[in-house]
């Protein structure tokens, strides 16, 4: 199993440009999450999904949109990038049932907006 | 809403020194608690987790953590650190009950540097 993968690994955008980050998991997990990581602030939840076709807002959703058209994929979109969105973005997934609430993380995408 | 505080932002230790990283959370209900580690340039990996039972939890690489409910704390410890423990450590809380997405709330992280 590849686990959780993210595409691309690095990206530089100009202010106002758009892009989509792709997260894929092959563990048949129901729940998927997008976080951003900024120095001294830990990870903050942007959006999440509890199943195919469903999405919900997290702690910092403004400026981002998401879609979960297939169970294994969770897309994060930036329609008009701003310098404040310069960050490292992590995707995670987990099972719904069972005793483990562990989230499994992808390798991250480093985004710079100039 | 729950919050998580990690008191030490940066810690520098020499090899073989003992480590304790503080983590406090604010939530009055039942919680699941986690410590994740992020080695330089890598993604987050689970060190250990607490769901119920024995409040002293042992994880990988010699790490352990103790859940003290009365203090809302889940401090991470290691008796003797190694250079390879240099990383950033994150405490995280899952508030059980009113948490439809089973979301984790993370602390701000503690950056540990171990000098050889």
Image (cartoon, coloured by chain):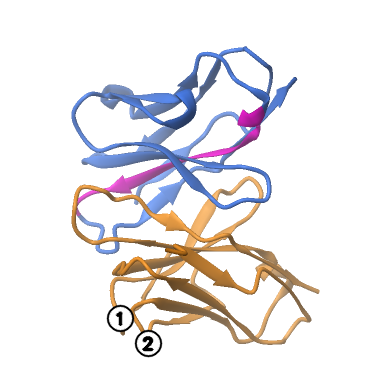
Chain colours: A orange, B blue
The magenta-colored residue range is B84-97
Q: Which quarter of the figure is the N terminus of chain A placed in? A: bottom left
For mark 2, give the secondary structure: loop
- Expressed as whole percent of the image width and height from the top left, the position of residue A55 reads 35, 78
Q: Is residue B27 visible?
A: no
Say whether marks 1 and 2 touch (CB < 8 Å). Answer: yes
Determine the secondary structure under disc 1.
Answer: loop
Residue beneath the point at 42% across and 78% down? A73
Dot 1 alpha-carbon crowd within 10 angstroms: few under 14, some 14 to 19, many 20 or more: some
Q: Please check the rendered image and state whether residue B18 is part of the magenta-colored stretch, yes or no.
A: no
Please tell me whether residue A76 is drawn above or below residue A104 in the rendered image: below
**Quick check: do tags 1 and 2 share a chain?**
yes
| Residue identifier under label 1 | A52
User: Which picture quadrant has residue A82?
Assistant: bottom right
> In the rendered view, does B101 fall on the left or right side of A113?
left
Residue B4, quarter of the rendered image? top left
């Amino acid at each position: 199993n590849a686990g959780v993968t993210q595409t691309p690994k690095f990206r530089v955008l100009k202010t106002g440009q758009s892009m989509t980050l792709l997260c894929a998991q092959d563990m048949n997990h129901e729940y998927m999450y997008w976080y951003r990581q900024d120095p001294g602030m830990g990870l903050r939840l942007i959006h999440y999904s509890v199943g195919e076709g469903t999405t919900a807002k997290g702690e910092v959703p403004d400026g981002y949109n998401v879609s979960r058209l297939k169970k294994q994929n969770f897309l994060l979109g930036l329609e008009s990038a701003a310098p404040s969105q310069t960050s490292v973005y992590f995707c995670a997934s987990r099972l719904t049932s069972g005793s483990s609430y562990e989230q499994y993380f992808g390798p991250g995408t480093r985004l710079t907006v100039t | 809403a729950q919050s998580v505080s990690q008191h030490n932002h940066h810690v520098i230790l020499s090899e073989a020194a003992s480590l304790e990283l503080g983590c406090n959370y604010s939530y009055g209900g039942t919680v699941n608690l986690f410590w994740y580690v992020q080695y330089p340039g890598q993604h987050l990996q689970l060190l250990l987790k607490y769901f119920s039972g024995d409040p002293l939890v042992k994880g990988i690489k010699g790490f352990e953590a103790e859940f003290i409910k009365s203090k809302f704390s889940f401090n991470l410890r290691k008796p003797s650190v190694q250079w390879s423990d240099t990383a950033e450590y994150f405490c995280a809380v899952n508030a059980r009950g009113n948490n439809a997405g089973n979301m984790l709330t993370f602390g701000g992280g503690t950056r540990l540097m171990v000098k050889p």
